[in-house]
Image: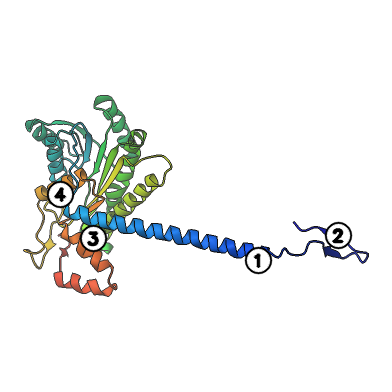
Amino acid sequence: MASTSVNKNGATQNLMEKAPWSDEQGIAMKVYDGLLLFLEVLILIVKMNITWLFSIYQFFVPCEPKSVEGEVILITGAGHGMGREVALRFGRLGGTIICVDINATGNQETVEMIKADKGKAFRYECDVTDREAVNNMAEKLRREVGEVTMLINNAGIMPCKPIMEHNEVDIKRVFDINIIAHLWLIQAFLPNMMERNHGHIVAMSSMAGVLGLRNLVPYCATKFAVRGMMESLHEELREDPRDFSGIKFTVICPYIVDTGLCKNPRIKFPSMMKIVSPQEAADNIVDAVRRNYHEITIPSSLYYVNMICRAMPYKVPIHLKDFLDSGLEPQS
């Protein structure tokens, strides 16, 4: 800080002239800061390229599937369709399967099928849109089975009709089941995963969560939301100063799956864009979870087609979409 004195006229005088080396020091600091920024950018480029090359390597040489033996795997919507098929496959791999569904009959059938396959399974009926019911189920589970280490949010509905034909109840229900229930289940089971730094959360999105389709406006909104929820949840744990690297996340984006939800599919090229069977979808889901993939589409080719199309001007992929002419007609 420069010293000052007051002269006989009351004016202040600077007693210390500006140091001759201060300008040089400022220039040196700017050069130093510039070098640091250059090094940071260089390191960033190296990291990004190494990660890119490693990803290419993993594409051709996938990592070995992890064992799920001994894992406690909770699957919602386990009473039929993809949920049942996934439950059967994880049961054969040695996981303890917790079948959750609001349909007691279908849920019990899945449990019996797993046990007939020499697997270990339990059933719990629960309305996953009811937060209190989810928390009560979680407490009961801990007492009777143990802590859930893998959560597969599979339950969902798909009303198919123009947006103006949906009433308030329809819209609230699709959001409650397809996205809000995910949050209640995550809040119920994630804390223990964080304590142990071990777990896996799987969320069922859809290709309708990657691109918008007519007659599915509320459904598409929920499936886009699932992807955003999982991405932000991953970032929340990744950026936490504590180590949560042992918790994995996988988003599944299937094309049309023959589970009974798709009542009136419209497919211009059936040989190219065939409807996926629940068995084929389940094989892909289980493989993705065991390899800790962050996101997959079913079939896998759609993932790369979408990535390429997203890099194009907005109207360009619209032509491809119109050419393929696939989607769902309104339910009668």
The answer to whether residue 134 is left or right of residue 266 is right
User: Distance from label 3 to label 2 (Cα)?
Assistant: 78 Å
Q: Which mark is residue 23?
A: 1
Front one among 15 and 74: 15
Nearer the viewer's eye, disc 4 or disc 3? 4
Secondary structure beneath dot 3 equals loop
Q: Position of residue 257 (x, y in %)?
A: 13, 54
Q: Are marks 1 and 4 in contact (CB under 8 Å)?
A: no
Q: Earlier in the sequence, mark 4 or mark 2?
A: 2
Looking at the image, tell me whether mark 1 or mark 4 is earlier in sequence order.
1
Q: Residues within 10 Å of mark 4 (few under 14, many from 20)?
A: many
Colour scheme used in the picture?
rainbow
Q: CA distance from mark 2 to mark 1?
A: 25 Å
Q: Using the image as rendered, state which of residue 32 and residue 136 is in the foreground.
A: 32
Q: Nearer the viewer, mark 3 or mark 2?
A: 2
What residue would you read off at disc 2?
A: 5
Measured from the top left, where is residue 102 in percent x and y? 21, 39
How crowded pointer 1 is (Cα within 10 Å; few <14, some 14-19, many 20+) is rated as few
In the picture, the quarter occupied by the C terminus is: bottom left
Specify the label residue 216 is tagged with: 3
Residue 55 visible in the current orientation: yes
Q: Position of residue 218 (x, y in %)?
A: 28, 58
Q: Which residue is mark 4?
A: 284
**Gap in angstroms between the C-alphas marked 4 and 3:** 24 Å
What amino acid type is highlighted by mark number 4?
Asn
* Quadrant placement of the N terminus: bottom right
Label 2 neighbour load within 10 Å: few <14, some 14-19, many 20+: few
Q: Quadrant of residue 5?
A: bottom right
Residue at far top of view: 143
Q: Tell me if 259 is positioned left or right of 14 in this view.
A: left
